[in-house]
Image: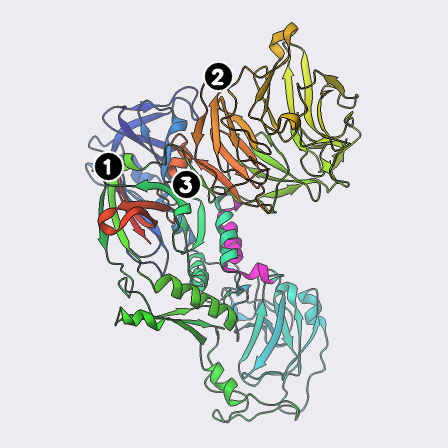
């Protein structure tokens, strides 16, 4: 086995990348690598002695903590002494792991983050590595008041506000917010200076309710200031209405307030925009950029915790990390970065077997050592019997000076029809939260000292608080184990068959089946059969965000169409409408404005759906054609027709080529070299088939559909999916017999087409009419049908892909632990909540919980 090696890439303030490697000899990338001929000096003594964890070590709640540790470089010759004059703090530092015989693209990134300024001693340089959590210790408020109001004009305040932070509101954080008075002459207050608010539904003076009525809203602050309000003249002057400029987060009173001014305010156009997931996503993208924020975990969090919550940052500084901790606390979540520096936010949930991406079994590897340890939570792992969830946060505690009281020497003023706050309201304003509980007193039968857990949140309603209390009780009222698993890094592997991972790629924006996909450069486009447009995602960033492209086209192609890339165009061909095949053929310029081009491409000779379509473009044999194979025709009958279009003149009529031996539908088609391959399907007379047909363009004068060139499928299937990547033909899902949906995934090495089919890891759920796509040795599965259309997407993780290897020990991933002594004979799913790596000694300790 080749020698393991770690590479360290350290960027300085000039943008220059310093490269180092472990071992006593240098390592150089190949001329074909990126970057080419890069020299790595043999100076690395320790490539990473680091720790990462969800929360504080050994705990499963509280503040999320970033990863940190040391990287040590040898410097006995003084060759790195010039580092003292370079700036490395805040710059990129990446550590990659592999073997000396690998090319650079095969190395797995195991650490990615930044460093503090290096510590230089006589013999070594120590880099204090940190993940990107360090970048989030900056305030979410970036604007400061200028303090330059002139008389009654302006919303920048007077000298008392100069250089103070402007307030920021996200979501629906609770009651009794304290706004900032930005114009004392015209009594203008601001609750959000970073965009519009949805509403300011209530303003209170001295805690009252209903005294001040909401008036008109104005588009700009200038219009708000220009309004002449009919000020109340009865002494003392008190407000009767307030008017708003929601676009700038402002409101204005029509009279002098007696007592503290507070309000309720809401940001976010809909309730769905005010969840913890959406607020954290917006702030993370704002700080890090969309490409660095994983989308799927946000979708999962929104499904699990669709509650309205919020954050309010007044003139006191609130950092991104503090905001994330508050919002995660609302929903029992955590945030952090994976090994590729992608930002994640997730709810801590019980691990399940289906989530496991690898199995750790000491009986199979004597070097795996497992120890059970108590958690460092306040209960030390003892199940809880009761959970209190506090909600409806009161952001301004008021115990004196309340309207309707005389404790401050002030009396209640107001219209006779307005009732001052009652005793209940007074009590509410003196409390920071309301409270609800969930309990399981049966826990006390076993655990006499079972503790009570209290969670503070910005949840708005008791119903949401009750739901969350019940969820946390279910999570915490049963035994949960914490293990430390020490093992060699080489023992950390996926299953040899691979593992399907739904967290590796963002789910589709809508449930999708009976459709097709095409890949343009690195982007997958999937046709939306309902609206006749495409959803697309860059597969080089599969955890990113789906987008839409194409003006909805009616009538749509319907279900069971095919899509193909030709040049810059994506073609949509045929489809099933009302049970019948249709002739619709249209194309979309992927570099254009999204307008469909129907005139630039001819309709099919015969309408079809449930067909296959491939592009064969070969200058040697002079074929430049789009081939449409079989399907269900316009009379709802299976057809053997093979239609062909000259792609150099797509507006010319379709022609015909040699028909299939038998009518066939529900099959797939691929191109490999000069072969057109038709896989499985229903041959009608002969039923669902395992036969694979090949049409060989290179055969010249003996071309035919040949069923002897490729080993048949191990069993028949129809309505499956297929793709070719790295010379392997993959076939996934489908039906056999009808209405029995399959999970199996198989592959055949087309370098030996008459060889045996190999098993690949089964799909997580049975499904047919799905799409599978491949790029850079990675396989993805999208949507499908198994009683209902699916939105789930999955990536097949494997040990052959560097990006996949990088994710094996990321926080929040689930492993299956087998250990009979602990009662884990069948395997116990455990979540990774922390890890310690020692790259010098090639060892790692995983801290798991479940």
Q: Is the C terminus in the top left, top right, bottom left or bottom right quadrant?
A: bottom left
Q: Position of residue 195 (x, y in %)?
A: 60, 60
Q: Which residue is mark 3?
A: 340
Front residue of 168/443: it is: 443
Occupied quadrant, residue 77: top left
Q: Is the residue under label 1 in contact with that under label 2 (CB below 8 Å)? A: no
Does dot 2 land on a helix, a strand or a loop?
loop
Q: Is residue 778 left or right of residue 568?
A: left
Task: Mark 2 or mark 1: name the one nearer the start of the chain.
Answer: 1
Front residue of 559/101: it is: 559
Label 1 and label 3: CA atoms lie apart by 28 Å
Front residue of 108/291: it is: 108
Q: Which mark is residue 754?
A: 2
Front residue of 92/61: it is: 61
Q: Nearer the viewer, mark 1 or mark 3?
A: 1
Q: Is residue 395 left or right of residue 584?
A: left
Q: Is the residue under label 3 in contact with that under label 1 (CB below 8 Å)? A: no
Q: Position of residue 56 (x, y in %)?
A: 31, 57
Q: Residue 283 colored magenta?
A: yes
Q: Is residue 495 left or right of residue 838?
A: right
The residue stretch that appears in magenta: 271-291
Task: Mark 3 or mark 2: name the one nearer the start of the chain.
Answer: 3
Q: Position of residue 424 (x, y in %)?
A: 50, 86
Disc 2 crowd rating (10 Å Cα; few below 14, some 14-19, many 20+) is some
Task: Mark 1 or mark 3: name the one nearer the start of the chain.
Answer: 3
Q: Residue furthest front?
A: 685
Occupied quadrant, residue 583: top right
Label 2 and label 1: CA atoms lie apart by 36 Å
Q: Nearer the viewer, mark 2 or mark 1?
A: 2
Q: Which residue is mark 1?
A: 365
Q: Is the N terminus in the top left, top right, bottom left or bottom right quadrant?
A: top left
Compared with 69, 711 (above or below) is above
């Amino acid at each position: 086995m080749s020698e393991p090696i770690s590479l360290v890439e350290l960027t300085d303030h000039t943008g220059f990348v310093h490269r180092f490697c472990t071992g006593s000899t240098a390592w150089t990338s190949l001329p074909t690598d990126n970057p080419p001929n890069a020299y790595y000096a043999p100076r690395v003594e320790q490539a990473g002695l680091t720790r990462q964890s969800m929360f504080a070590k050994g705990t499963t709640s509280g503040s999320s903590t970033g990863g940190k540790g040391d990287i040590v470089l040898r410097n006995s010759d003084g060759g790195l002494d010039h580092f003292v004059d370079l700036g490395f703090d805040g710059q990129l530092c990446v550590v990659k792991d592999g073997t000396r015989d690998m090319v650079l693209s095969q190395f797995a990134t195991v650490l990615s983050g930044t460093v503090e300024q290096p510590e230089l001693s006589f013999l070594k340089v120590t880099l204090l590595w940190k993940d990107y959590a360090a970048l989030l210790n900056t305030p979410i408020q970036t604007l400061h008041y200028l303090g330059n109001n002139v008389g009654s004009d302006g919303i920048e305040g007077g000298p008392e506000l100069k250089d103070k932070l402007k307030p920021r509101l996200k979501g629906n954080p609770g009651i009794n917010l304290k706004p900032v008075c930005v114009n004392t002459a015209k009594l203008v207050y601001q609750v959000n200076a970073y965009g519009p608010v949805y509403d300011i539904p209530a303003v209170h003076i001295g805690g009252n309710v209903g005294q001040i009525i909401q008036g008109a809203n104005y588009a700009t602050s200038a219009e708000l200031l220009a309004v002449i309000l009919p000020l109340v003249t009865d002494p003392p002057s008190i407000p009767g209405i307030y008017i708003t400029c929601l676009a700038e987060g402002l409101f204005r009173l029509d009279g002098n307030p007696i007592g503290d001014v507070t309000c309720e305010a809401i940001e976010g156009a809909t309730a769905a925009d005010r969840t913890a997931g959406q607020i954290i996503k917006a702030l993370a993208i704002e700080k890090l950029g969309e490409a660095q924020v994983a989308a799927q975990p946000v979708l999962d969090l929104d499904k699990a915790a669709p509650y309205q919550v919020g954050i309010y940052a007044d003139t006191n500084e609130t950092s991104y990390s503090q905001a994330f901790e508050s919002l995660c606390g609302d929903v029992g979540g955590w945030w952090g970065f994976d090994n590729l520096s992608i930002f994640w936010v997730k709810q801590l949930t019980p691990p399940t077997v289906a989530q496991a991406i690898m199995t750790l079994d000491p009986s199979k590897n004597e070097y795996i050592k497992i120890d059970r340890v108590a958690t460092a939570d306040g209960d030390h792992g003892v199940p809880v019997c009761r959970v209190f969830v506090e909600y409806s946060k009161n952001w301004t505690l008021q115990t004196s000076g309340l309207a309707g009281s005389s404790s401050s020497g002030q009396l209640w003023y107001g219209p006779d029809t307005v009732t001052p706050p009652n005793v209940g309201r007074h009590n509410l304003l003196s409390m920071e939260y309301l409270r609800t509980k969930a309990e399981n007193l049966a826990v006390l039968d076993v655990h006499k000292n079972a503790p009570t857990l209290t969670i503070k949140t910005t949840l708005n309603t008791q119903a949401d608080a009750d739901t969350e209390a019940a969820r946390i009780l279910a999570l915490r009222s049963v035994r949960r184990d914490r293990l430390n698993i020490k093992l060699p890094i080489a023992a950390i592997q996926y299953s040899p068959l691979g593992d399907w991972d739904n967290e590796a790629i963002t789910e589709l924006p809508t449930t999708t089946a009976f459709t097709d996909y095409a890949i343009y450069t690195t982007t997958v486009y999937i046709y939306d059969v309902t609206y006749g447009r495409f959803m697309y995602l860059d597969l080089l960033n599969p955890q990113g965000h789906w987008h839409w492209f194409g003006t909805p086209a009616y009538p749509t192609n319907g279900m069971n169409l095919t899509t193909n890339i030709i040049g810059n165009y994506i073609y949509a061909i045929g489809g099933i409408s009302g049970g019948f095949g249709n002739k619709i053929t249209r194309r979309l310029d992927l570099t254009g404005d999204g307008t469909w081009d129907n005139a630039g491409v001819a309709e099919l000779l015969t309408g079809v759906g449930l067909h296959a379509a491939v592009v064969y473009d070969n200058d040697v044999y002079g074929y430049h054609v789009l081939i449409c194979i079989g399907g269900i025709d316009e009379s709802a009958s299976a057809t053997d027709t093979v239609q062909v279009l000259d792609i150099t003149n797509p507006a010319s009529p379709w022609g015909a080529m040699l028909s299939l031996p038998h009518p066939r539908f529900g099959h797939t088609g691929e191109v490999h070299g000069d072969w057109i391959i038709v896989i499985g399907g229903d041959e009608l007379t002969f039923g669902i088939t395992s036969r694979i047909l090949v049409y060989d363009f290179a055969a010249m004068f003996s071309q035919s559909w040949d069923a002897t060139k490729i080993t048949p499928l191990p069993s028949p299937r129809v309505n499956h999916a297929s793709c070719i990547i790295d010379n392997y033909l993959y076939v996934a899902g489908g039906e056999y017999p009808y209405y029995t949906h399959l999970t199996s995934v198989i592959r055949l090495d087309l370098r030996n087409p008459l060889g045996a089919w190999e098993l690949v890891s089964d799909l997580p759920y049975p499904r047919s009419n799905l799409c599978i796509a491949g790029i850079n040795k990675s396989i993805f599965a999208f949507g499908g049908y198994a009683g209902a259309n699916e939105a789930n997407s999955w990536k097949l993780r494997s040990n052959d892909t560097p990006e996949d290897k990088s994710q094996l020990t990321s926080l929040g991933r689930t492993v299956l632990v087998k250990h009979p002594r602990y009662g884990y004979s069948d395997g116990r799913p455990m979540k990774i909540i922390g890890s310690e790596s020692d790259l010098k000694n090639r060892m790692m300790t995983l801290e798991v919980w479940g």
